[in-house]
């Protein structure tokens, strides 16, 4: 892999490493196509040895859906942050899941808009302080996987994991790709790290993930 373009301590490289290992183990690297949303996710450009391209913000899901229809034998992966998935990209993601489109969506959830300064995002937690919620975010976070669970068709797969659990990440990614191969929609949300915008050191970064995020965003298989 080339030198990482991500900030020190970022969770993106860990998620991408897990994805790369699974694709290699399944012998699918040459069939994989990785679509990147705008935001920190676009820094994955040329990070993995797979065909990769950038899409417009919030449009990675329909772009990969179109690629899948054009080349049904490909493994189409839509890679985006929580904003690109649950804010500007929610309409496309919701209806792709409802129609059971055979693609795999990977959502990186770090509770904020990281690339633009750490503002509140769909997944910002109640009471969390950000530059746009200095007194604590007053609302509850958006739980995309749980909402999608109620509208997906039988055979779809939805799960949530965290970047400090490599074994679970790889297991869920593999199941998601196998679901796509079987002709169904799949999504895996990764609870990720952003020490730069959380203003945390190493131990406190992991503590924030374990003690703040995991009680709010339950990890595990949600559908399928």
Image: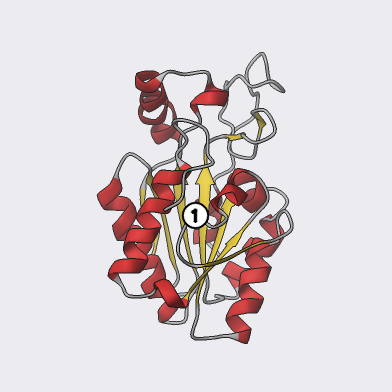
Q: Position of residue 162 (x, y in %)?
A: 38, 43
Residue at mark 1:
47
- What is the quadrant of residue 165 in the picture? top left
Q: Is residue 118 left or right of residue 202?
A: right
Image: 215 above or below 202? below
- Residue drawn at (72%, 23%) of the image: 132
Q: Secondary structure at mark 1?
A: loop
Could you say where residue 101 lies in the image, as x and y percent from the top left? 56, 76
The answer to whether residue 168 of the structure is visible from this angle is yes
The residue at the far left in this view is 167
Q: Residue furthest front?
A: 2
Rendered-image quadrant of the C terminus: bottom left
Nearer to me, 167 or 145: 167
Question: For the point 48% across and 67% down, which residue is it?
Answer: 50
Quadrant in which residue 116 is drawn: top right
Q: Residue furthest top?
A: 135
Mark 1 crowd level (few <14, some 14–19, many ≥20, 10 Å Cα): some
């Amino acid at each position: 892999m080339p030198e990482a373009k991500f900030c020190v301590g970022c969770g993106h490289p860990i998620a991408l490493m897990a994805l790369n290992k699974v694709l290699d183990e399944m012998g699918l690297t040459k069939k994989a196509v990785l679509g990147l949303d705008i935001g920190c996710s676009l820094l994955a450009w040329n990070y993995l040895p797979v065909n990769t391209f950038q899409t417009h913000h919030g449009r990675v899901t329909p772009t990969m859906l179109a690629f899948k229809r054009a080349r049904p034998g490909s493994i189409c992966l839509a890679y985006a942050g929580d904003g690109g998935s649950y804010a500007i990209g929610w309409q496309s993601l919701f209806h792709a899941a409802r129609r059971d489109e055979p693609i795999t969506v990977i959502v990186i959830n770090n509770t904020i808009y990281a690339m633009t300064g750490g503002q509140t995002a769909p997944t910002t937690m109640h009471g969390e302080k950000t530059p746009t919620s200095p007194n604590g975010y007053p609302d509850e976070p958006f739980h995309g996987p749980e909402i999608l669970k109620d509208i997906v068709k039988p055979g779809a797969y939805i799960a949530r994991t965290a970047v400090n659990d490599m074994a679970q990440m790889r297991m869920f990614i593999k199941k998601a790709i196998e679901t796509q191969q079987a002709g169904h929609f799949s999504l895996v949300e990764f609870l990720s790290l952003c020490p730069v915008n959380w203003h945390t050191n190493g131990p406190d970064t992991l503590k924030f993930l374990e003690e703040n995020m995991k009680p709010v965003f339950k990890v595990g298989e949600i559908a399928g």
